[in-house]
Image (cartoon, rainbow, N blue to C red):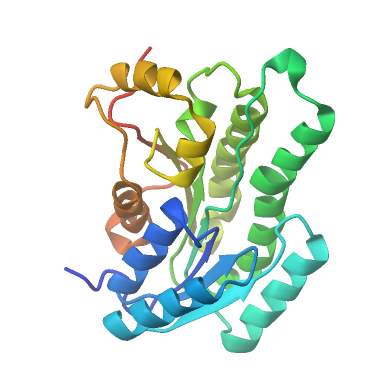
């Protein structure tokens, strides 16, 4: 089936590349109308959105804004509201990574990673939820966390803390918003074949981590997107407040 999201309107952040881009593609393939949010305007990305919208016969709207700027977030929401009065699905995928030992982590770096990975998602979700409440039909929010929020990884204190906060937020939101027919879940991907992984993980640590994965490989972005599709669709109508680990069986 390739119409799981037919007549659904989705907002996806951080979808210019990596996991976010795969989610965008998967949603378009399944007939969702998508608001594709990214930080910087990019002709190549806009052309890609046009290409897949034609291929899958659906609408894709590109929205560009700085996730660290509260006013820019508000402006992005206003732009979305000029094009739709409802949102069925929100995927918070925008995020950055930071690597440094605990004692070497500067407070400026900690603030920056929380600003992008947590505070911006918090604020953006508040705005989108107002549109979801108007739906009255079932809506779904999926927050993209990380296995680093669950497993303790050396050098990832700031990143892991920000992603752990996102998991806790997801659980609280699931309880507060359930009366409005809004489900909230989180996904914790393991190592995934993206630029973020390749630029932040050295070969030695990569090999050591793969040895701790039951399937002995990293994930492809499309595999994470498949899990997001499940949580976004009505097939997961009784799934709420959960953290879905998609890590190939990562263990200590």
Q: Could you tell me residue 202's position as x and y percent?
A: 48, 25
- The residue shown at (58%, 87%) is 83
Q: Quadrant of residue 168?
A: top right
> In what quadrant of the picture does the N terminus appear?
bottom left
Q: Could you tell me residue 176's position as x and y percent?
A: 60, 50
Q: Could you tell me residue 195's position as x and y percent?
A: 47, 45
Q: Is residue 195 left or right of residue 226?
A: right
Q: Nearer the viewer, residue 159 or 178?
A: 159
- The residue shown at (35%, 49%) is 221
Residue 46 appears in the picture as rendered? yes
- The residue shown at (33%, 86%) is 54
Residue 102 against residue 131 in the figure, above or below: above
Q: Is residue 66 left or right of residue 252?
A: right
- The residue shown at (49%, 24%) is 150
Residue 97 against residue 157 in the figure, above or below: below
Q: Is residue 96 left or right of residue 193?
A: right
């Amino acid at each position: 089936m390739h119409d799981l999201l037919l007549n659904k309107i989705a907002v996806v952040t951080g979808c210019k590349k990596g996991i976010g881009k795969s989610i965008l593609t998967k949603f378009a393939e399944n007939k969702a109308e998508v608001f594709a949010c990214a930080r910087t305007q990019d002709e190549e990305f806009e052309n890609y959105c046009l290409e897949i919208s034609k291929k899958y016969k659906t609408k894709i709207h590109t929205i560009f804004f700085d996730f660290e700027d509260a006013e820019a977030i508000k402006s992005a929401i206003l732009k979305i509201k000029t094009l739709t009065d409802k949102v069925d699905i929100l995927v918070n995928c925008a995020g950055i990574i930071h690597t440094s030992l605990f004692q070497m982590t500067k407070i400026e770096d900690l603030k920056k990673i929380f600003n992008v990975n947590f505070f911006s998602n918090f604020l953006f979700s508040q705005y989108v939820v107002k549109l979801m409440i108007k739906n009255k039909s079932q809506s779904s929010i999926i927050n993209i966390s990380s296995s680093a929020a669950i497993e303790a990884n050396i050098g990832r204190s700031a990143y892991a803390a920000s992603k752990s906060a996102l998991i806790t937020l997801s659980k609280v939101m699931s309880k507060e918003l359930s009366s409005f027919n809004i489900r909230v879940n989180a996904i914790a991907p393991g190592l995934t074949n993206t630029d973020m992984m390749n630029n932040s993980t050295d070969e030695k640590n990569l090999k050591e981590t793969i040895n701790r994965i039951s399937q002995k490989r990293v994930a492809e972005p499309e595999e994470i997107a498949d899990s997001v599709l499940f949580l976004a669709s009505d097939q997961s109508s009784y799934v709420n407040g959960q953290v879905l680990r998609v890590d190939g069986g990562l263990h200590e």
